[in-house]
């Protein structure tokens, strides 16, 4: 006996969502399109869902007959190894992700491995199989963090597909110039024509590409139309000068200090202050120097050798006299006159002056001392926090590793916040000025002293995979937390980072942590079992990452 079903009619726009709603409600309450109630309704629903699934996977929505699109462009990159292609299909098929709470079990979270897989594939320079592109674009559509790496890996065919399916238009918006081909940068006439006639996104892409190759040519091109650009466009174009910023950019940036837009003026001042030899930096140094001095007469507690006489010992102390007004010259150089709510005007102006002054100013101003010696000096009248916070911002802006080390202090210091950093965010930014090895070593020392409770944000700035000292510090701290008998949930963020960032070669060293430990008397009930699961998941994930790398490197 042959089963018959209602004919399947092409669903309209939004049909997939309608089919899902019908499935959730049940065909007794809502029937599929062009189908009446009855025993054939469930079959018709499944048939319609199957047809719509094929349409979605094909990457093209049904529409009225029109001119056939041009063939997809060729991808010149070598094909992805077959084993790696199979792995990608598995990663893209997984939509479960980590559960919102409760027990995760021992299975790796494949959705969190996809970004790492894409980064490794892009480093290898391979092209994806054409049939995975729709799933890859769907994944990038749902996760904005995936888009840069996913679109780089997908290559030119992703943009071709994005022009055919509205669901993937984000790919056109995410690609400078909307995927339009830029002229050859040596073709001066074509470059000039696109700059004068192109869409805004195309012009941004052109300026960025030219700036990365020939900074002076990009700046000169921008100067040809600068006076006629809209304020918001001038701001975006000016931001492109961060790439390859150098002394030759100073005259253009000095002119931008007189711009009509306050945001443009502020950005120009920020860029000039990142050039320690600029005239603006010199002006800010003079202003900041006038606010900061050394007082050699400040008394401290009697020294040990002087306690018998009770005489006080004078120690050099930094004194601060913040500016009493924000004059027009300060405003022209980027100082924002109006302080935020709850902030004193004088301290607001003072912080901006110190932040923009070259850090070399302070050794000259404060007796030839090194940054570490300067940071160690006491500061009068509760100005230390403001002064050190401004130095932190200056060290980050000027990428000064020596000052960053001084402000971070020793990672094993009794207090978690170093002598100058006032927040975890600032410490993370200061660490970003150090090379990867030194950064990992500092964070490892911090964890060894202070544990993991404050380390999550610092771990986020460390290079992946973590260097061996940092990896050992994290595992040792997790082991200590396990032995304390508490539940592992408060460390789930660090455990998730470890799954993605630990060197896969560490997997063998973790085997000893897979057994369920003996629980101390004051331990939380069942905590040992949860920890064993967490470490099992960690080890399984590390071995999976090792397999992924091997598959990508297979010839």
Image (cartoon, rainbow, N blue to C red):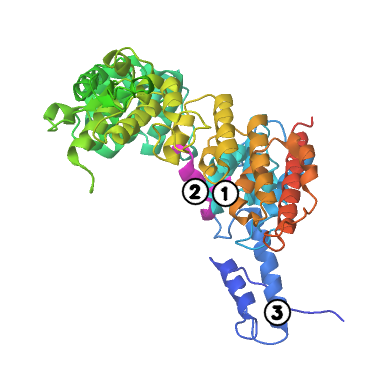
Q: Closer to the camera, 59 or 546?
A: 546
Q: Secondary structure at mark 1?
A: helix
Query: To which residue does mark 3 refer?
Result: 42
Marks 1 and 2, how far apart at CA: 9 Å
Marked residue nearer the N-terminal end (1 or 2): 1
Circles 3, 2 touching at the beta carbon (< 8 Å): no
Marks 3 and 2, how far apart at CA: 35 Å
**Which image quarter is the N terminus in?**
bottom right
Residue 70 seen anywhere in this rendered image of the structure: no
Rendering coords of residue 233 (x, y %): 30, 36
Marks 3 and 1, how far apart at CA: 32 Å
Marked residue nearer the N-terminal end (3 or 1): 3
Query: To which residue does mark 1 refer?
Result: 140
Rendering coords of residue 327 (x, y %): 12, 30
Q: Which residues are magenta?
A: 161-177
The chief SS type of the magenta part is helix
Q: Secondary structure at mark 2?
A: helix
- Please rate how many residues cluster around mark 2, counting C-alpha atoms within 10 Å: few if below 14, some from 14 to 19, many from 20: some
Q: Is residue 217 above or below residue 457?
A: above
Circles 1, 2 touching at the beta carbon (< 8 Å): yes
Marked residue nearer the N-terminal end (3 or 2): 3
Circles 3, 1 touching at the beta carbon (< 8 Å): no
Asked if residue 173 is among those painted magenta in the image, a careful observer would answer: yes
Query: To which residue does mark 2 refer?
Result: 170
Residue drawn at x 65%, y 48% as measured from the top left: 481
Q: Is residue 136 above or below residue 121?
A: below
Rendering coords of residue 479 (x, y %): 69, 45
Which residue appears farthest toward the front when viewing the image?
308
Q: Is residue 534 above or below residue 351?
A: below
Residue 198 seen anywhere in this rendered image of the structure: yes
Rendering coords of residue 338 (x, y %): 18, 41
């Amino acid at each position: 006996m042959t089963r018959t079903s209602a004919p399947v009619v092409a669903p309209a726009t939004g049909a997939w969502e309608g089919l899902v709603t019908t499935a959730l409600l049940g065909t007794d309450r809502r029937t599929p399109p062009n189908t009446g109630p009855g025993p054939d309704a469930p079959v018709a629903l499944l048939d319609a869902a199957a047809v719509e699934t094929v349409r979605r996977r094909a990457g093209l929505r049904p529409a009225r007959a029109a001119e056939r699109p041009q063939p997809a462009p060729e991808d010149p990159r070598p094909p992805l190894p077959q084993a790696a292609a199979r792995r990608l299909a598995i990663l893209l098929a997984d939509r479960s992700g980590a559960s919102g709470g409760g027990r995760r079990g021992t299975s790796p979270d494949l959705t969190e491995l996809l970004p790492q897989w894409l980064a490794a594939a892009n480093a290898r320079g391979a092209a994806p199989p054409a049939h995975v592109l729709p799933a890859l674009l769907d994944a990038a559509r749902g996760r904005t963090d995936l888009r840069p790496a996913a679109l780089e890996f997908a290559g030119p065919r992703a943009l071709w597909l994005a022009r055919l399916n509205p669901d993937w238009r984000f790919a056109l918006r995410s690609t400078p110039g909307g995927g339009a081909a830029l002229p050859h940068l040596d073709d001066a006439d074509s470059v000039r024509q696109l700059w004068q006639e192109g869409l805004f996104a195309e012009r941004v892409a052109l300026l960025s590409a030219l700036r990365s190759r020939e900074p002076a040519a990009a700046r000169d091109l921008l100067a040809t139309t600068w006076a006629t650009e809209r304020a918001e466009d001038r701001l975006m174009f000016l931001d492109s000068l961060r790439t390859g910023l150098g002394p030759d950019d100073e005259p253009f940036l000095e002119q931008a200090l007189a711009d009509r837009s306050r945001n443009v003026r502020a950005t120009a001042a920020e860029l000039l202050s990142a050039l320690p030899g600029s005239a603006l930096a010199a002006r800010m140094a003079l202003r900041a120097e006038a606010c900061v001095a050394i007082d050699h007469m400040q008394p401290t507690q009697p020294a040990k050798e002087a306690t018998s006489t009770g005489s006080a010992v004078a120690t050099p102390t930094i004194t601060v006299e913040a500016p009493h007004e924000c004059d027009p010259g300060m405003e022209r150089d980027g100082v924002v006159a109006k302080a935020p709510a709850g902030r004193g005007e004088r301290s607001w102006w003072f912080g901006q002056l110190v932040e923009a002054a070259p850090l070399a100013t302070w050794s000259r101003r404060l007796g030839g001392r090194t940054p570490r010696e300067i940071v160690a000096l006491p500061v009068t009248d509760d100005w230390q926090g403001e002064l050190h916070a401004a130095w932190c911002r200056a060290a980050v802006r000027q990428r000064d590793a020596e000052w960053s080390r001084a402000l971070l202090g020793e990672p094993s210091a009794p207090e978690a916040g170093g002598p100058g950093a006032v927040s975890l965010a600032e410490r993370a930014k200061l660490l970003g000025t150090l090379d990867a090895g030194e950064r990992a070593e500092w964070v490892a020392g911090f964890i060894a002293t202070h544990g993991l409770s404050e380390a999550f944000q610092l771990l986020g700035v460390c290079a992946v995979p973590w260097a061996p000292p940092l990896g050992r510090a994290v595992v040792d701290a997790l082991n200590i937390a396990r032995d304390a008998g508490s539940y592992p949930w408060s460390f789930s963020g660090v455990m998730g980072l470890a799954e993605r960032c630990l060197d896969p070669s560490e997997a063998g060293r973790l085997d000893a942590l897979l057994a369920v430990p003996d629980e101390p008397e004051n331990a939380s009930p069942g905590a040992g079992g949860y920890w064993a699961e967490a470490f099992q998941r960690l080890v399984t994930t590390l071995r999976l990452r090792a397999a992924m790398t091997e598959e990508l490197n297979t010839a």
